[in-house]
Image: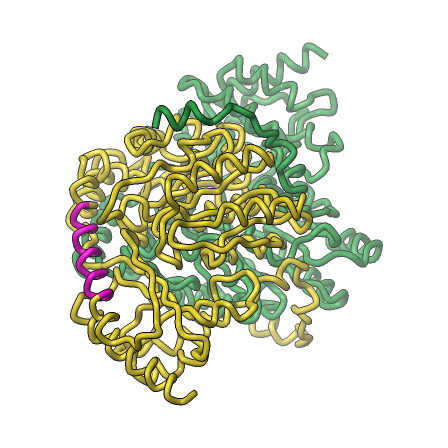
Chain colours: A green, B yellow
């Protein structure tokens, strides 16, 4: 082999000349580079979207792995159907119905977390000729998924009741190229707000009127710790909604398991896309999750998660009231993992980031959550309250308060 | 909610008008429909590409799951890095080097099986303006992955020494739009042949001369049961080869775990693509596979798989010699899972399929393995010998012999 290697002249290839056009939109986000600064262990990070690891049901996973491998190991380790493991789909049908979402087994596709659901939707529906209509701000991961399919965006602002439906209608009237409206109605990432029931009805009215469809991304819907559940959009318009959810926030994200609910015709297309993308989601992981779920464990477990996150949210809200300058505002989430901070005009949250990291605290600057960085995002930051315990949250918010005050004095 | 539902007028959306252009190439393969016929339990199927389930190391999986959840459960169930779990990458670096493949940790990306590697390569390199050069026949899954990125193909025949390199050069000279050459040098799927060392050298010479790169797909390389290992193409030209492999055929396919070896610059691009596609491959699955591998289990285990598949290949070769009409020819694989049958001109293997299923035996008609179905594939079929035990193989080949003889008499 040494001889073989020396025979080959070293001639480097120009990889840059070989990438497909769509990769121009796939550059690594500035935020990923920023976040590398936060890897030091003494930094308190509110930047990630990590669930509390101490809530992971380790014992239940151990029991389920043992059961599945002992009783159905040959099936669990073999190739499986692209659509997903049927008993898990049956469980999800039942769970979705209890939650108000009408679904049958043929309406469900298992995915590698919600992120793959976004990718498959991109592959099947997004191209350079049409527009995706998103909230402003919107989920960073959806932008990453759809940029790879050369998405163009139009955006509609949201307030504490969710997307501004009148503005949505105005935006739709200005463009005939919109293919779908993408919303995160419950405990919005990054904004932390929920769409009111009346806005949901109005949204459905609009998509019917203009013959569009909705992608309803609902990773946190079950993590409501205050107030009443609000009817899912898919319940109001099941024939024109693609609904996404995930086990990442209720069981664990490390198993990469999510699902799509959609009309059977759409599922067939998404299945074709998934077949080319990775054949199917791990049979083993699906069977383990199914075993945990079928034991009826999830319902009680989710209650414990809600109680834990409520404590943490309260710790963050109280600490912000104590430590943040008066000019700083924030949203009040009734569930989920995030809240959204608005700084006074003179504070740029990208510039502030370095000051904050010097104070040993981190967040995600708001600009990451806008399809076009027109500066609006630089007055915002996203804070996560699920990952750190209340003591760390209080200390982290104190540090962030110091950074904010320093930045305000500098101006 | 009942009230809400009745408020919404039922107005169906025309989904067909909403799909992205690329979906025109994503139609479900005819073969998938055919294979549904084979779901009856009394059909002996040589159609799938399934490993022998009785070889799955169930006890090792149980021990590894237990160890990982007991000792590093919080890490295993949490989000992880897109690039993959570092200890597993380190293990793969070591394993790849022993196999002759020069690689460092930064040259490796973990994927959801090789199929996701093909998809990510499609996302980063394939578009409607350039050509992918494949062998004829080639792996069905690669076509499915790349069709979704609107791939165009040019093809080069292979013989029992692999791709015809002189024809490859002629094809390249006729087109300036070729971006890369895709080959399966070891125990080709579907053809069962391996590329000779001299052809590998010549292939590298050609890609250097015409400034192309190679995608070397090597899922079966370790499953050689006869003859000597042949130097991997990536060893001869590591700066212009993207090498793919998988745990599907050595550990188990149900965990969906494969990897890419490529220049660091290419890995960075593929990581961006994977981040949008699914964030990362299951941390839990990677840590379990790593635990099994780090115990040194794989080396002995692969020897047992080789011995098992050798028996099965021999059973199939012997039975074909006994039961097939004289005019039928087949390849002689020195490893892997498949062999390739050539029928006389008067037999169409798509038509024969129904006769075979009536005799309770199934295979994949060759036409599935050609980017353009010009009829050539209809004189071939792919047979899998890894899944069924020798007794079933003999009985299945006997049945297929009956079907072949019936079809020949009908003409």
The magenta span reads: B303-317
A166 left or right of B123?
Answer: right
Is residue A314 in view? no
State the quadrant of the N terminus of chain A: top left
Residue A93 x %, y %: 42, 67
Q: Nearer the viewer, residue B73 or B27?
A: B27
Q: Nearer the viewer, residue B362 or B260?
A: B362
> Is residue B309 one of those drawn in magenta?
yes
Residue A65 x %, y %: 23, 51
Please tell me whether residue A333 is drawn above or below residue A375 in the rendered image: below
Please tell me whether residue A92 is drawn above or below residue A401 in the rendered image: below
Q: Nearer the viewer, residue A157 or A142?
A: A142
Q: Residue at x 37, y 50 (%)?
A: A302
Residue A360 x %, y %: 49, 16
State the quadrant of the C terminus of chain A: top right
Q: Residue at x 56, y 19 (%)?
A: A401
Residue B20 x %, y %: 67, 59
Principal secondary structure, stretch drawn in magenta: helix
Q: Nearer the viewer, residue A149 or B207?
A: B207
């Amino acid at each position: 082999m040494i001889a073989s290697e020396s025979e080959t002249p070293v001639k480097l290839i120009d990889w840059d000349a070989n990438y497909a056009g769509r990769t121009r939109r796939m550059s690594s986000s500035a935020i990923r580079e920023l976040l590398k600064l936060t890897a030091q262990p003494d930094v308190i990070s509110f930047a990630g979207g990590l669930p509390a690891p101490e809530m992971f049901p380790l014992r239940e996973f151990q029991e389920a792995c043992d059961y599945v491998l002992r009783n159905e190991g040959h099936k669990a380790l073999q190739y499986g159907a692209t659509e997903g493991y049927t008993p898990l789909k049956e469980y999800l049908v039942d769970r979705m119905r209890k939650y108000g979402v009408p679904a049958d087994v043929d309406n469900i596709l298992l995915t590698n977390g919600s992120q793959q659901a976004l990718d498959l939707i991109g592959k099947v529906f997004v191209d350079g000729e049409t527009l995706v209509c998103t909230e402003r701000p919107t989920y960073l991961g959806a932008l990453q998924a759809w940029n790879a399919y050369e998405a163009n965006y139009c955006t509609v602002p949201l307030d504490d009741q969710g997307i501004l439906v009148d503005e949505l209608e105005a935006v739709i009237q200005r463009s005939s190229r919109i293919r779908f409206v993408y919303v995160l109605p419950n405990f919005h990432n990054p904004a932390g707000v929920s769409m009111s029931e009346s806005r949901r009805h109005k949204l459905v009215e609009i998509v019917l009127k203009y013959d569009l469809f909705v992608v309803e991304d609902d990773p946190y819907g079950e993590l409501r710790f205050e107030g009443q559940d609000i009817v899912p959009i898919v319940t109001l318009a099941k024939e024109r909604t693609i609904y996404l959810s995930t086990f990442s926030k209720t069981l664990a994200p490390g198993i990469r398991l999510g699902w799509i609910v959609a009309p059977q015709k759409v599922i067939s297309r998404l299945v074709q896309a998934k077949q080319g993308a990775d054949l199917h989601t791990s049979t083993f992981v699906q069977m383990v999750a199914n075993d945990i779920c079928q034991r009826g464990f999830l319902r009680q477990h989710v209650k414990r998660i809600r109680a834990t996150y409520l404590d943490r949210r309260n710790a963050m809200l109280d600490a912000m009231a104590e430590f943040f300058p008066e000019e700083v505002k924030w949203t009040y989430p009734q569930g989920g993992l995030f809240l959204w901070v608005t700084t006074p005009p003179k504070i740029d949250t990208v510039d502030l980031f370095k000051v904050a990291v010097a104070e040993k605290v981190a967040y995600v600057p708001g600009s990451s959550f806008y399809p076009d960085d027109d500066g609006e995002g630089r007055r915002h930051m996203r804070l996560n309250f699920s990952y750190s315990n209340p003591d760390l949250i209080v200390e982290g918010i104190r540090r962030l308060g110091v950074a904010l005050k320093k930045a305000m004095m500098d101006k």
